[in-house]
Amino acid sequence: MNQFTFERATAPDAAIASAARSSTAQLGASVRFVAGGTNLVDLMKLNVERPAHIVDINALAVPGIDKIERQANGSLRIGALARNSDCARYPNVLRDYPVLSQALLAGASPQLRNMATTAGNLLQRTRCVYFRDTAHACNKRNPGSGCDAMDGYHRNLAILGTSDQCIATNPSDQNVALTALEATIQIRGVKGERTVPISDFYLLPGSTPDRETILEPGDLITHVTLPPPSPGARSAYLKLRDREAYEFALASAAVVATVRNGNITRVRIALGGVGTRPWRSPEAEAALTGKPVSGANFRAAAEAALAAAKPRPGNAFKVELAKRCLTRALTLASTQA
Amino acid sequence: MAPIPTDLEHEIENEQDAAPGQAESGLLSHRLSRRTFLSQASAAGVVATAAPLLVTEPAAAAPAAAAHDEAAAVRAIPVTLNINGEDRHLELDARTTLLDCLRENLAMPGTKKGCDHGQCGACTVHVNGRRVNSCLSFAVMHAGDKITTIEGLGSPDHMHPMQAAFVEHDAYQCGYCTSGQIMSAVAAVKEGFGPTDDDVRHAVYGNICRCGAYSNIVAAVQQGRKHI
């Protein structure tokens, strides 16, 4: 691990100013925030992340940055530093956004959930073995150097949103639920505050797989906000993986649906484990809106969701797996009381 | 702080391995093990870095050159950690994880390094009463936190009920995952989980056992939870 200077920040402007010294907020950043540390410290041990300066933001004095608070307009504001375990069991989350609680509890381990934060989870990096091993060629770590995953081990990698440069998945469960819930992300930077919908937050790899989010140097995520819950919405998070616990998704699906008189009046669908970013599926949503609840309609929506899939030999099974995952998640959601 | 007696130290005490003339030497005048050597080294104020046998000077002794000062600041950050109720004053390389600090700087090897990447749970300790993987945070981040390790949970003569349950149910084979299992189980009981064996498995799935002692671990947790 490289040596680094360390600062424990309380004033947000000081933290932002420190981070703004870096020329990038993407891979290779020379200044990093640390909150839970569960991803950053892991990647620093692998020498994938090598920041020269680290800013500990656990004591940052930003109102509500570590809290979960219902807002006057009915939305739920989740602090960037709220721990995943606390968010998963928070009464408002359990009652109004249970898909988020299910997704969080499906991820990592109890210990990791006690450390990991909302914003840290948003920013967690791919589990591609070649990204995590600096001995291998990786266009994300080193643009233009090649991708050893393409003809190597890519069982856990993406079939949607890929490019000829990169097929790395976003491995998070939380982010899939947040995508289906249409969360927005509050960011404070050198130029002030802004809000970004989660659907605009992540970048496709394209020809610049080293750029993963819209964050600029100095940017500090302060909150994630969920819109007021849809009345009567039913939801489900289903995660499929090689073992029952403590493992990332091969395919997962988050579904939030409103059903009236047996018809789906509104539905939001996001897939995990299969996309280069948390994968919202407007195709599946369009195929289902206004349609009766039925297995056949669910399956048709799943076909639409995966129609653009570009599998490689080692992850081709994911196409059918993801379809069945989404179909099952829709069934689970719609058969709730 | 007297080291907790272990089988290893008793072995060496009983072995007739002191050569003639060595009885006069300060080091060999009492029982010597790798564990006591390290704890004496720490007590003598020698600061170990993440490479345990490397000795660095405290920041006060560093020359005035700015680059060296900054490098020294990186290598010797002063921090006070509260471990098992006791304040410990340290100067640490910023890179020292809480796990390495416990094992190497504080000579408290009860917490184990299994994978060093948050994938096994052997390094589980409590920070402010909550279970965490000590391999994945930097020690200098924990100023002001209350840290509990297996050494603070109980001792051979005064075992915590969960420790006693693990002993009674033979809930270990090599013992390497055990302190993490116990720390995790104790915290899980406080978090709360359902009554069945499957609930227990789900509550502590963040702790892996290569020896496969799981069935006895589940039985131990089911007993230990009744007495907390």
Image (cartoon, rainbow, N blue to C red):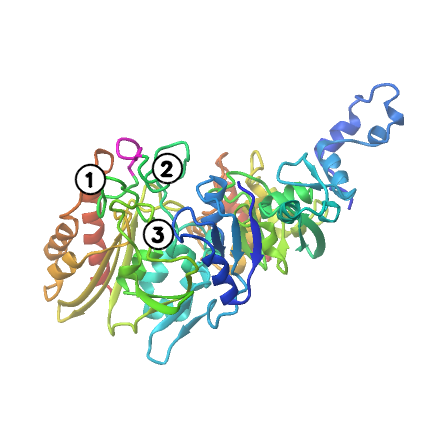
Magenta stretch in the rendered image:
A146-155
Quadrant including the C terminus of chain A = bottom left
Q: Are marks 2 and 1 in contact (CB under 8 Å)?
A: no
Residue B55 on image: x %, y %: 70, 37
Q: Element type at marker 2?
A: loop
Look at mark 1 in the image and give the residue it sits on.
A311
**Viewer-side residue, A105 vs B113:** B113
Look at mark 3 in the image and give the residue it sits on.
A172
Measured in 3D between alpha carbons, the distance from the residue under mark 3 to the one under mark 2, in whole angstroms, is: 16 Å
Horizontally, residue A43 falls left or right of residue B149, namely left
**Residue A152: in magenta span:** yes
Look at mark 2 in the image and give the residue it sits on.
A129
At 65% across and 44% down in the image, what residue appears? Answer: B68
Measured in 3D between alpha carbons, the distance from the residue under mark 1 to the one under mark 3, in whole angstroms, is: 20 Å
Taking A5 as reference, is B10 above or below it?
Answer: above
Residue A254 on image: x %, y %: 27, 57
Q: Amino acid at mark 3?
A: Ser
Residue B117 on image: x %, y %: 48, 42
**Viewer-side residue, A139 vs A177:** A139
Q: Earlier in the sequence, mark 3 or mark 2?
A: 2
Q: Earlier in the sequence, mark 2 or mark 1?
A: 2
